[in-house]
Image (spheres, rainbow, N blue to C red):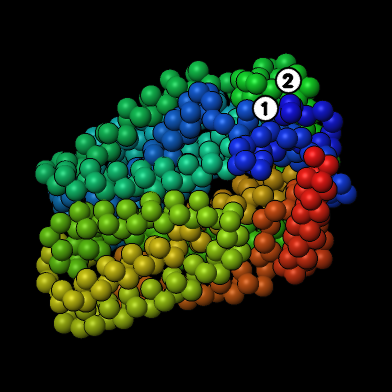
Amino acid sequence: MASNLKSTNSFSSTEKDDKGDQQQIERVPQNLEGISEFDESVVIAEGEEHINAYTYYLLGVGALSGLLFGYDTGVISAALVNIGTDIGGKVLTSVEKEWVASSTSVGALIGAWFGGWFMDRIGRKGVLLCGDVFFAIGALLVCTSFSLVQLIIGRLILGLGVGIGAGVCAVYLAELSPTLQRGRVIGLQSICITGGQLISYAIGAGMTFHNGWRYLFALSIPPAVFQAVALHFLPESPRYSLLKGRREDAKDTLRIVYSLASEDVLDRKCDIIQATVAVGQAFNQKHPSILGRLRAIARDGRYRRPIIISSALFLACQLGGVNSLMYYSGTLFAAAGLKNPTAVSISVAATNVTATTIGVIFLDKVGRRRTYLIGAPICIAALCMASMCFHFMTIPTGGKLDTSLIGGYQYPSNWVIGMIMCMIIYLLGFCPSLGTVPYTTIELLPLEVRSIGTAIAVSWQWIGNIVLSSTFLTIMNKTGPAGSFGIYAVVIAIALVFVYFCYPEPSGLSIEETGELFTEGFGVKKANMMRRARQQVVKESRQGTKGGY
């Protein structure tokens, strides 16, 4: 049967017939609540389940953004170990290292707000091009630095590119990718971010020679230039085109994305996008100022509660300690007496990539809430064991690690190996849960406040990142590594309690249904009831459809 949509309430799907062959069928759900003018998933175009050449190109451009984001945040781990006396003719102190590391996070916070503010004014492509310029200029300043001030300014400008890449690129990819491939496209960016960190560690392990860290930063310039050129051959987001009243441009873009779709399907998809755009415009017209929108969010629990959830999970993602490893694993392992700490850090980065990939693949199958409730206890146990390893390992040095020394003290190898294994177990629990679930909480935000709500939530991510990266070495020098990692365990334990009582499971719910969760309270029990009811209706609908064939 034809897979193009024939009516608003019908949708196509792929099922296996009695012989096991896949067939395109068209279904008309009976009494299926939650499908509305905003639910794009009911409008499935012919061939949408397959990835065409355009989608592969889109994936490539998105991968570059993720790789740049990951590379420029991860490269500092190797650089801080190898920088030596190249800056100002002296070894950087722990506080100066924190300034260098955290300056990128400060820039990212600014970049996230810059991107969110301007992407509806100059377009997604325009903002991404600005991000590529920041990547290139920042990398150039850093690799030519001979003073601490220039190094920090360069890292700050790099952070502007990171902030834009973290937010706007994800929005651009989501708005341009086919509906059925959207999760895969966005998930790829998460994998590429961790992949970029792994690449920076691997290259850094081979660039331990004098001034090798300069080449590390310089290597990020060509990909930024290439991405800027590649963006030229991609269309603007259809959502942005409709925002500016250019319906034909939006439809032309959708025609590229859904190359086999009929005109009726393209019109329907265009109508759905237009409806979501209108919702946001109506809210902004009612509350024209930023302060007015913030007041509306604070007064209305339907807006306030999901933003609290998203912000809290983003904050816990950072204060849970993962970026202490991404930024300082080289410094940490060097202080632990390892001769090539950057090479050892590769195992950490490889675990990060593997665990993130697992999380992206199984998140929808297991469920967001359940994934978090499984992963967080693993993190807590691993951090407690790591704290114990650090305690016994550092007894000869009074419970402290001297982060200014490179291989200055040879600690007992059994405790060092135990500590590294605990870090790996920690990442295996962290990446699929605390590291992945926060990014899915954006779907909880009502359409009319999704833009400003996302900006608020992501801001807490970078605020947490700044706090962690600017204090890790100082806290570790004062409390010892055992105390530092014990603090991270407490933070994750608090986050676990919060998720158990306040984070509802959104998997399988429509946009309207997720909006209804927060009318009274945080809707944890309500979500379970709605999901069971929806699953039952879908099951009955499928049984009725099969009976009609």
Q: Residue furthest right?
A: 31
Q: Is residue 487 left or right of residue 277?
A: left
Which x, y percent locates residue 392? Answer: 24, 83
> From the viewer's perspective, is residue 372 above or below residue 511?
below
Pick whichever of labels 1 and 2 is earlier in the sequence: 1
| Residue at 62% from the left image edge and 20% from the top image edge | 259
Which x, y percent locates residue 471? Answer: 38, 64
Find out whether the residues at labels 1 and 2 contact each other: C-beta distance under 8 Å: yes
| Label 1, label 2: how far apart the Cα atoms are | 8 Å
Query: Which quadrant of the view contains residue 170?
Result: top right
> From the viewer's perspective, is residue 56 above or below residue 376?
above
| Residue at 38% from the left image edge and 29% from the top image edge | 224
Task: Kindly identify the amino acid type of the residue bearing the numbered disc 1.
Answer: Glu
> From the viewer's perspective, is residue 105 above or below residue 169?
below
Which x, y percent locates residue 146? Answer: 21, 40
Q: Nearer the viewer, residue 23 or 485?
A: 23
Residue indicated by mark 2: 262
SS at mark 1 in the image: loop
SS at mark 2 in the image: loop
Label disc, if present, on residue 46 of the rendered structure: 1
Count of marks overlaid on the render: 2
